[in-house]
Amino acid sequence: YQEAPPGLKRCLKLSMTDGIQRVFGMEYRPIKALDVCASSGLKVAISNVQVRRGLLMLVPETIEVLGGLVERLDAARKRLVDELNKPARGNRYKLIIPIGLFRLI
């Protein structure tokens, strides 16, 4: 996980729930109020959003970040991010296949 400023090259995919139903949204245009490392349990209000193939197309005009935090979820997310950001352990082996061993048909 790396912090990325909102820009044309960033595209966030959000998993959101109201406690009953889960929906996914994609940052279609940069949204300055959203961070890559936003806290888990962040509350948002969404209105007048376009839906394409079941995905909410999020633009600054359709989303309002209200704030909020679920401590248990955020602690679990931070542990996962810390684990993912650790350097790889052990030796990495490269699989080298000599080209002469294969016959093209």
Image: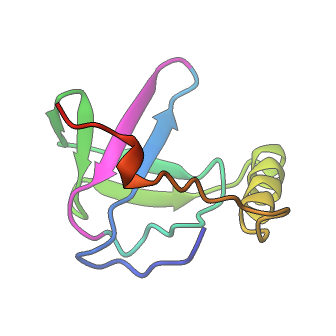
Residue at the spot 76% in from the left edge and 45% down from the top edge: 73
Image spot of residue 75 (x, y percent) = 83, 54
Task: Choose between 55 and 43: the one closer to the eye.
Answer: 55
Query: Which residue is nearer to you in this view: 46 or 6?
Result: 6
Pick the front one: 74 or 105: 105
Q: Quadrant of the C terminus?
A: top left
Q: Position of residue 77 (x, y in %)?
A: 74, 52
Q: Which residues are magenta?
A: 20-30
Left or right: 98 with respect to 9? right
- 63 on left or right of 97: left
Residue for point 54% across, 17% down: 20
Position of residue 3 relative to residue 92, above or below, is: below
Q: Is 29 inside the magenta-drawn segment?
A: yes
Write the residue at 37% across / 53% down.
99
Q: How many marks?
A: 0
Q: Is residue 73 left or right of residue 98?
A: right
Across and down, in percent, residue 84 comes to 72, 60
**Quadrant location, the N terminus:** bottom right
Position of 45 relative to 87 (above/below) = above
